[in-house]
Amino acid sequence: MNEINVPRPNNLDAFWMPYSDNKYFKDRPRMLARAEGMHYYTPEGREILDGTSGLWCCNAGHGRREIVEAIQKQAAIMDFAPAFQLGHPIAFEAAARVADMTPEGLDRVFFTNSGSEAADTALKIALAYHKARGESSRVRLIGRERGYHGVGFGGMSVGGIGPNRKQFGALLPYVDHLPHTHLPAKNAYCRGEPPHGAELADVLENLVALHGAETIAAVMVEPVAGSTGVLVPPVGYLKRLRDICTKHGILLIFDEVITGFGRLGANFGAERLGVTPDIMTMAKGLTNAAVPMGAVAVKNDIYDAIVTGTSAGIEFFHGYTYSGHPLAAAAAIATLELHRAEDLPGRARALEPYWQDAVHSLKGLPNVIDIRDVGLIGAVELAPRPGKPTQRALDVFRRCFDEGVLIRVTADIIAMSPPLICEKPHVDRLINTLSDAIMAEAA
Ligand SMILES: Cc1ncc(COP(=O)(O)O)c(C=O)c1O
């Protein structure tokens, strides 16, 4: 083990850590200091296999030279330039590259700095679109129970994870939710898309009957719900949602922050699952997380309604100082080039059967109550310790980390999403370590 020469903080107080048990962490810090390929390294030099692509984002693996050099080069050429009423070539190039990858017809790209900003931007675009077309009454936004669309007020309101909402008051008005699609009694341990539950999409018809289609602007869902603990859409579910939205003039937004950029063995979840939304959000894998960036791709007629349809002047009163930031744009171009050159979606597709067998080999271990997978995503749901929900999965997480493997937990669900450069021996190490940890925490 080679110690890594990084500054060692002697005061952990100032950094209020996001989505963390600050007190627990600061009592027992667990630091990562370096990353390369499939691995992280602790400051002491201990190697940790990355079973989660960081936070579902380093799809091309860590420390990719091509991305690092693109960022370094751009930083030296031009660190920043405003994108309000001015342009810099690299942002246009990045948008064109994204548009090349998105499903046909989603050719206009708005840049943000995160998935949360992409979610709120998508919702604002939906509202502006209907207003531009003279349907100002369409202000209602529909999400789904257990959905996650980041932490802005829009995404949080449309999102459906209780603890993420309960601290923050009234949230946005005029929001409703579809039921989640988790049907363990019918679908437990199924491989890939579950067979039962397409009819849950029909609840959208009930919401239309309740509120009136003329009040509904958009439905936003993750093609595969990730943060809640991996819920794969039932066969036919997304197609039904698509059809109902089309029938009633409601925009369908896919939040592809996790499912984009090869995670499901295709450029986007839309492609893999065969359903094209009107608006698509993305982030994370867009720049391999080397520089924060998000984006919203929209159908051309949405752009036309808002932009072409407005007479002179600013057409959409929205944007971020860092929209299309040169360093992020450089990272995006280099990342998307790597995706193309190394066919990362194809690699994920090729590994998927092996991955699926490996993840499902955990069936039968003590306290395992469900296993789910799609693309290079796998989830193992554990029975909670009596009276101590979330504790068993956290203990498994800590044990895996101590054994040199990074997994992710949500409640008592373990989620895995390794970089798409993953090879079979990495899968074996990840699953074997997890298996040992589940056994050890069986008591
Ligand atoms: C589906 C989805 N949308 C939005 C977000 C929020 O992205 P960010 O944390 O970059 O704001 C996430 C983050 O995990 C996500 O999974």
Image (spheres, rainbow, N blue to C red):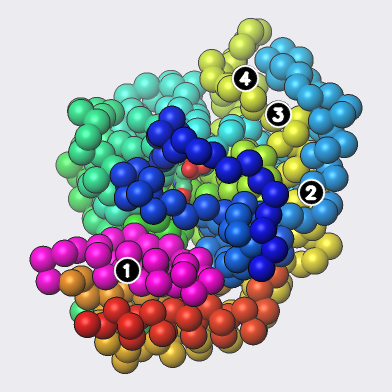
Residue type indicated by callout 3: His
Question: Which comes sooner in the sequence, label 1 or label 2?
Answer: 2
Q: Where is residue 175 in the image (x, y as percent from the top left)?
A: 26, 36
Q: Where is residue 353 in the image (x, y as percent from the top left)?
A: 57, 85
Q: Residue 321 carries which label?
A: 4
Task: Name the residue beneath numbered marker 2.
Answer: 67
Q: Position of residue 103 (x, y in %)?
A: 64, 53
Task: Name the residue beneath numbered marker 3.
Answer: 325
Query: In the rendered structure, are the residues bearing label 1 and label 2 in contact, judged by CB atoms less than 8 Å apart?
Result: no
Residue type indicated by callout 2: Ile
Q: Position of residue 266 (x, y in %)?
A: 64, 65
User: Callout 2: 10 Å neighbours few (<14), some, many (20+)?
Assistant: many
> Label 1, label 3: how many angstroms apart (C-alpha)?
40 Å
Dot in front, 1 or 3: 1
> Label 3, label 2: how many angstroms apart (C-alpha)?
15 Å
Question: Which comes sooner in the sequence, label 3 or label 2?
Answer: 2
Task: Name the residue beneath numbered marker 1.
Answer: 395
> Label 1, label 2: how many angstroms apart (C-alpha)?
35 Å
> Label 4, label 3: how many angstroms apart (C-alpha)?
8 Å
Q: In the picture, which quadrant includes the N terminus?
A: bottom right
Q: Nearer the viewer, residue 123 or 432?
A: 432
- The quadrant where residue 127 appears: top left
Residue shown at 69% from the left, 30% from the top:
324
Q: Which of 163 and 219 is in front in this view?
A: 163
Question: Which comes sooner in the sequence, label 1 or label 4?
Answer: 4
